[in-house]
Amino acid sequence: MAGNDNKNMVIKALAAENLRLKRENRACLEQSRLFESFLEMVGAVSEENLLRHTMKRTLEITAQLSGAETGSLFLLDESGRVADSLLTRGDVSEDERSTLVGTVLDQGLAGWVRQHKTVGLVADTKTDDRWISLPDQPYTVGSALAVPIVKNRALFGILTLMHPTPGFFSPEAVETVCMTADHMALAIEGARVYIRMERLNRQRREAMTRDLDLARQVQESFLPARMPMIDGYSFAAVNQPALTVGGDFYSFYTLPGKKLGIALGDVSGKGIAASLFMARLSSELQHYAPVFIEPGRLMSKINRVLCKRSQQGMFVTLIYLVVDLKSGIVLFANAGHIPPLLLDGSGVTPMTDNGFKGPPLGIMPDAAYGQESFVLEENANALLLTDGVLEARNPQGGIYGLARFCDDLERLDIRSKGVRSEPDRLIDGILDAVDRFSQGQGVGDDLTLAVIHRIRENRIENKE
């Protein structure tokens, strides 16, 4: 007999363990459904509705687990006050919601759970003082189960499940719902964290947009509002930032002795930092250009100033020209930039610096900058550009490059009669050539061009 008793005890223990494992497996499956639902909602539900949808799905799944017909869910903040809620009767006015929540938490089962931080099971609502019937209650409750949702040992929420039949919730149902409570907290807190992160990201994006707009306005204020109006010359320029704010710039400076200074540069990096560095450089050039007429001396001065004040490794490549407007003689100094191109009757010629090219400004305070010269004859152009033009790429990864660019300039002059005498048309032709090469890929860097054209004078010959 003793052997049979022991055998029966083992069978009962195994049956109980099997039942427990089945309940745990079911609970795990429902928890998995809860997290899958949350992941689906993250992509499909708007930020403002995500938490409500997560709460509703949590309530639906736990009701299915326990067999409950109705339920409510309260989420609490760190001080224990209700931060959000789903009521059994559905959507109500804010005043009615506040009254109902206050009543339940002061006198009802949910309030008891909040006070004791343990499961509250009401087998019969008619005989248990912890249950209160609310005014105009549109449903019947015979039994109720309230479960605390705990996160990091703090009460995170209270889930209440209800059924019209007294004694409906079995110990097994209570155990199953309690097993899922921790996972409810994870899913709901996941929704809260996601919402907070989305709001922070949106605020950052909005702040960045405001900063970029402000920096763009600063940058645009330092670019010339109009081209110089000078007898015997015409000018054109274009600036296309790769981002909202770029680091390319150009400017013109009226100098003593009927001379004109032209600067075109490319600040390292992009965005706000490049724009602000460019603004400071433009201010320094505006101040020193009338003082240091020779390009080499001006470059050396600006370089020392920038090296003294430069931060975070910012530097700039720069080409600076001084045009004698009477003779057409152009002096230029180069700080690590693409040399100017001369477009005249003999074709397209890069103006080499014969070893006088110095490093970018803002790196080496004692760097020396020499200068070179060329003559801008009548009906000729001097073209300045940044590397955004030459570094344009096509879909195959090919780079535009200086040689291809010069060839396109030659073909452009043959194809479009008189294009060289109209700087605006010349720039439009260059932009079209870059676009044809890149096949709609756009440019990965800021793109800036400036053209100085010396107009051919109309002369009347004397005939004897």
Image (cartoon, rainbow, N blue to C red):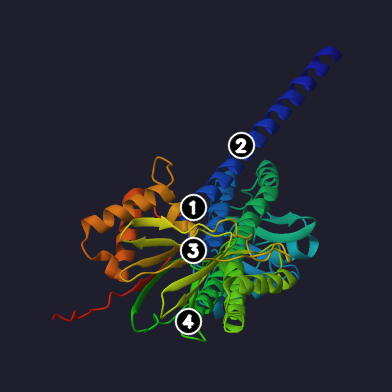
For the residues labelled 2 and 3, the Cα–Cα distance comes to 53 Å
Quick check: marks 2 and 3 in contact, CB under 8 Å? no
For the residues labelled 2 and 1, the Cα–Cα distance comes to 27 Å
Please report the residue visible at 63 percent of the width from the left and 54 percent of the height from the top: 190
Q: Nearer the viewer, mark 2 or mark 3?
A: 3
Q: Nearer the viewer, mark 4 or mark 2?
A: 4
| 4 or 3: tag closer to the N-terminus | 3
Which residue corresponds to mark 2? 26
For the residues labelled 1 and 4, the Cα–Cα distance comes to 62 Å
Image position, residue 12 (x, y; %): 74, 24
Outermost residue toward the left? 464
Which residue corresponds to mark 4? 259
| 3 or 1: tag closer to the N-terminus | 1
Is residue 9 depicted above or below 146 in this figure?
A: above
| 67 or 61, nearer to the observer | 61
Secondary element at image label 4: strand
For the residues labelled 3 and 1, the Cα–Cα distance comes to 28 Å
Secondary element at image label 1: helix
Which residue corresponds to mark 3? 243
| Residue 192, quarter of the rendered image | bottom right
| 174 or 392, nearer to the observer | 392
- The numbered dot on residue 278 is none
Left or right, residue 366 beside residue 55: right
